[in-house]
Image (cartoon, rainbow, N blue to C red):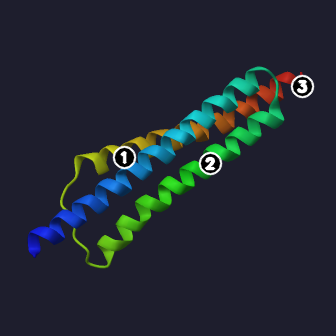
């Protein structure tokens, strides 16, 4: 019985890790689309892509938070390299999305001068 519970916990963590990676990856794609639009001075499109990037990051963050909250409630997870990778992926792409926001602002300022 204990082995089955461990397998279920591992599968749960792997599923969440993949959700984080997928949503964060989608966020990265949208951030790149936002920069492409900003380079063309298409600021409305850039801001829409940025909004979608942030929405994807939020979905990834919610998946991660679920695991953290479960651990706080006493649910123990074994160390999982894929989950660690997913968290790293999310953190990196969150920074990229934040930088994208700033770049769009800069492009917009420069375009008005």
Q: Is residue 60 left or right of residue 97?
A: left
x, y percent for residue 63: 44, 60
Q: Is residue 60 left or right of residue 69?
A: right
Lower position in the chain sequence, tag 3 or tag 2: 2
**The one of 103 and 42 positioned closer to us in this rendering:** 42
In terms of secondary structure, where does tag 1 sit?
A: helix
In terms of secondary structure, where does tag 3 sit?
A: loop
Whole-number angstrom distance, CA of label 1 to CA of label 3? 39 Å
**The one of 69 and 23 positioned closer to us in this rendering:** 23
Judging by the rendered image, the residue that carries numbered circle 1 is: 86
Image quarter of residue 65: bottom left
Whole-number angstrom distance, CA of label 2 to CA of label 1? 17 Å
Task: State whether residue 87 is above or below residue 64.
Answer: above
Outermost bottom residue: 73
Judging by the rendered image, the residue that carries numbered circle 3 is: 112
Judging by the rendered image, the residue that carries numbered circle 2 is: 54
x, y percent for residue 16: 37, 57
Tell me the crowding category of disc 3: few under 14, some 14 to 19, or many 20 or more residues within 10 angstroms, Cα based: few
Q: Is residue 15 left or right of residue 60?
A: left
């Amino acid at each position: 019985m204990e082995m089955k519970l461990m397998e279920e916990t591992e599968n749960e963590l792997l599923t969440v890790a993949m959700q984080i990676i997928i949503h964060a990856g989608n966020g990265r794609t949208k951030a790149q689309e936002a920069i492409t639009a900003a380079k063309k001075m298409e600021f409305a499109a850039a801001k829409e892509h940025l909004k979608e990037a942030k929405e994807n990051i939020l979905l990834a963050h919610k998946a991660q938070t679920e695991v953290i909250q479960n651990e706080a409630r006493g649910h123990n997870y074994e160390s999982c390299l894929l989950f660690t990778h997913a968290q790293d992926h999310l953190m990196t792409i969150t920074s990229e999305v934040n930088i994208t926001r700033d770049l769009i602002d800069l492009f917009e300022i420069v375009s008005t001068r």
